[in-house]
Amino acid sequence: MLTDPIVALATPPGRSAVALIRISGRGVFALAASCLSPFHVEPARTVFRAQLRHPASGEAIDDSLACCFPGPHSYTGEDVVEISTHGGLVVPGAAVAALVAGGARPAEPGEFTRRAVLNGKMDLLQAEATADLIDAGAPAQRRRALQQLERGLSARLEALRGEILDLEALIAYEIDFPEEDEGPVAPDRVRRAWSVARERVAGLLATAPEGERLREGALCVIAGRPNAGKSSLFNALLGTERAIVTEIPGTTRDAIEAPAVIAGFPFRLVDTAGLRHSQDRVERGGEGERGVGSGEWTDPASDAFLSQVRSPVLRVRTKVDLDPIRRPSVRPSDVCVSAVTGEGLDELKRRLAAEAFGRLLQLGDVEPVVTRARHRAALERALAELDGFEAARSAGVDAAATATHLRAAVTALDDLIGVVTPDDVLDRVFASFCVGK
Ligand SMILES: Nc1nc2c(ncn2[C@@H]2O[C@H](COP(=O)(O)OP(=O)(O)OP(=O)(O)O)[C@@H](O)[C@H]2O)c(=O)[nH]1
Ligand SMILES: [Mg+2]
């Protein structure tokens, strides 16, 4: 495991009041001492003012603040120094260069957090949550990431792991005392313990579709006949004039996608060209696509469109300001909006959030949720092994053989939490991290 000193700018480069630079690894206190004066480790975790100089030329770089975190009581578990300098493009760059001249290596993306995982400061789920928290673009994403960072998901999985271990212990009796008729443990007890564990795995797994959608944003396509007001609705939902709106039908030629926060949830909104002919094909997006049909639906093009859509559809009646007496074609479940007066937009936003994230809304922020394909795959494996256990037991397979399924289920959960994590898994998790985290 690498413990060589690494350095990175933890704040984004650009015009700002301050920048934060971090160094971590073996010998970083001596390294920092060659660049900072005065420099002292004690008192630990206490900020002091120091001149930052280039270690070779002695050139003054900045009047800075520094703080030492002796390992293991640091983010990475190693000795860490954090240095705050003035912001901007030049000062932080010169400060990093000075620390590199002092012997630190520029850090890889996510390398600090990777060391934190390897040193047992956090598990893999918390590391993923760290990235999610930084990348959060909607309040719901932030809340979910924070909950995972605070071990909400880890604790649930550990409890689940414990339950399977208990079940394994029950089976161990049967392995040790095979001669006993019914076994020393009532079959009922085994079955109950199994079904509790299975239910929990299945329950977590059921959160995966919306959990993954929460990370990626729900795809929502606005479709309808030309001039129906799709681009106006798109802009109104985004809160900016992103798409061109004119009174001429056929204004929008190509679909445009933009991220939007709707009722606190992340969406990927798509504005499309108007539906003209009944042979217009539905371009089906990925799983989890939401469709918003707007305008009139009595025309054949829209009917043909709707008949092909397999994703949930929310029917929207646009321009209701022009139509104060609602036409009979409006169904009670339709949402009536006006991009001009803003009428109905809040209702539409609520409906979209409920459609795409209803389950999460019901669960609230306390119940853990799985948010990545990696999580889903591990839970699917655990579930298959639990089912394999029950099937083997019903088929009268001997206890030792049935127990291998329980072992495999525990291993799947261990992989998920990151108890022992192979390098390639770490590489994948940290690939999307930013430098300095
Ligand atoms: N009164 C009123 N006019 C609207 C409303 N929404 C859109 N319009 C008008 O309707 C016309 C068409 O609006 P767009 O948003 O460009 O419609 P579109 O469906 O994107 O049209 P295409 O891209 O051509 O298919 C424009 O003149 C808008 O100003 C609304 O809620 N009320
Ligand atoms: Mg348009």
Image (tube, grey):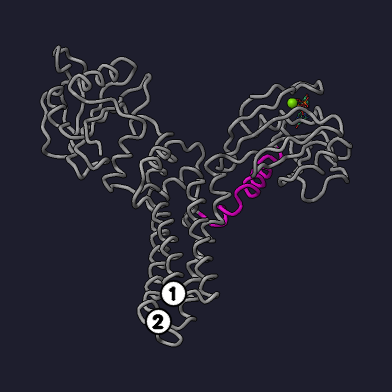
Q: Where is residue 337 in the image (x, y as percent from the top left)?
A: 74, 38
From the image, which quarter does the N terminus lie in?
Answer: top left
Q: Position of residue 107 (x, y in %)?
A: 30, 29
Classify mark 2: residues with Cα within 10 Å, few (<14), some (14-19) or many (20+). Answer: some
Dot label at residue 288 = none
N-term mark: 1 or 2: 2
Up the image or down, 354 lies above or below 182; here it is: above
Question: Main structural element of the magenta stretch: helix, strand or loop?
Answer: helix
Q: Which of 258 and 166 is in front in this view?
A: 166
Q: Is mark 1 within 8 Å of ligand 2?
A: no
Q: Nearer the viewer, residue 358 or 195?
A: 195
Which quarter is ligand 2 in? top right
Quadrant of res 406: bottom left
- What number of labels is visible? 2
Q: Which of 139 and 53 is in front in this view?
A: 53
Dot label at residue 178 = 2
Dot 1 amino acid type: Ala
- Cα separation, mark 1 vs mark 2, equals 8 Å
Dot 2 amino acid type: Pro
Q: Where is residue 217 in the image (x, y as percent from the top left)?
A: 57, 39
From the image, which quarter does the C terminus lie in?
Answer: top left
Say if mark 1 contacts mark 2, CB within 8 Å: yes
Residue at the location (46% across, 43% down)?
142
Up the image or down, 205 lies above or below 61; here it is: below
Q: Name the residue under label 1.
A: 399
Which element carries disc 1, helix, strand or loop?
helix
Magenta residues, start to end: 343-364
Q: Per the image, is 353 magenta?
A: yes
Classify mark 1: residues with Cα within 10 Å, few (<14), some (14-19) or many (20+). Answer: many
Residue at the location (53% across, 48% down)?
211
